[in-house]
Amino acid sequence: MKVLFIGTVKFSQSMLRVLIKEKVEIVGVVTSLDDGLNSDYSDLRPICKKENIPFHITKDINSNESIKWISSLDPNLITCFGWSRLLKKELLGIPELGVLGFHPAELPKNRGRHPIIWSLVLGLNRTASTFFFMGEGADDGDIVSQEGIEIKAKDNSSTLYKKITKVAENQLPKIIKQLRRGTNTLIPQDHSKANIWRKRTEKDGEIDWRMGAESIHNLVRALAKPYPGAHFIFKKEKYKVWRTEINKTNNFLNLEPGKVIKISKDKSIIVKCSDFSIEIVDFEPPIKIKAGDYL
């Protein structure tokens, strides 16, 4: 089985290493340079050079140049793990076995963009690691393997990313064995249960202190590293927030949202929200602020 690999993020790197360990014949890798669009970008070229795998750098996976290069390698299977643009019909039709994709969500629910971020922003307590054969739509193909993953209250984007990667690393070898034997089974998605998450914008990451403390806390943990961080604006300057704690005391019900209640000795900032208050534990850059100010 000859495999063509597509990917450009840290998850891609993990999956590429799994395929190498499984002694899959990887005939080529399609990847990209760091254009700033992926916070979790990973350069796959060092692995390709070490393993003597041909690679192709592109901005457009559906370009004539990319399709010609992929077709020349005559792959039986294409794997696409960590590529944010849809593959067009011409590319999907190249391998006889199809294009194996991945989505970190409980398909058919939660198709689309930024699934790790949105699952945390929305306060979900469950997601999944899902491999599926790609179609022309967004994450709508037949499911090959799906493993549920619990999202705990202490999870942020970094810990959830690692959880999902670990589960996927265990799934992929089993899938490869089934494909080699021709014993894999496909589960069609129930499209009536599907929703599609939209692309996140910078505005989505801005903290509005009229939000509840839990919603703000979820936003912060959703945009923790490797993602760009939630933020607030104070005196026209942007401050990135990396970690918060919820303070559920009812002592400040008469205070307006956004009011700074206290500056702690460790420089953390306690701010009133719509319901409770929240402690900004880790943020940057340093801020000159005092109790009684408004964010």
Image (spheres, helix red, strand yellow):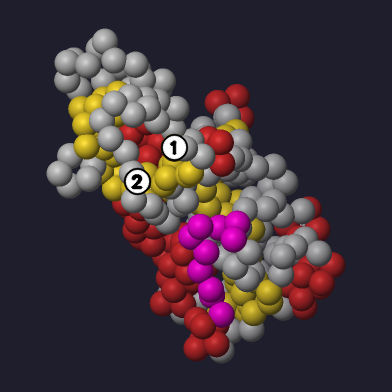
Residue 75: image location, x then y, percent:
68, 72
In the rendered structure, find residue 234 and report the number of the disc placed on it. Answer: 1
Q: What stretch is highlighted in magenta?
A: 36-45
User: What residue would you read off at disc 2?
Assistant: 287
- Give how far across and how far down residue 109 sits, in percent: 51, 32
Q: Which residue is pictured at 53% across the width and 73% down the height?
A: 43
Determine crowd level at label 1: few under 14, some 14-19, many 20+ residues with C-alpha closer than 10 A.
Answer: some
Nearer-the-camera pick, 182 or 80: 80
The crowd level at tag 2 (other Cα within 10 Å; few <14, some 14-19, many 20+) is few
Task: Classify the position of the N terminus by image quarter.
Answer: bottom right
- Residue extending furthest toward the right: 64
Residue 54: give x, y in percent of width and height. 64, 83
Q: What residue type is labelled 2?
A: Ile
Q: Is residue 228 left or right of residue 292?
A: right
Residue 293 spot, x, y in % from top left: 34, 29
Contact, mark 2 vs mark 1 (Cβ under 8 Å): yes
Q: How far apart are marks 2 and 1 (CA)?
A: 9 Å
Q: How many labels does the image show?
A: 2
Any magenta on residue 253?
no
Task: Return the disc, 2 or 1, that comes first in the chain's sequence.
Answer: 1
Residue at image position (68%, 77%) is 56
Give the residue displayed 56% in from the left and 41% down from the top: 202
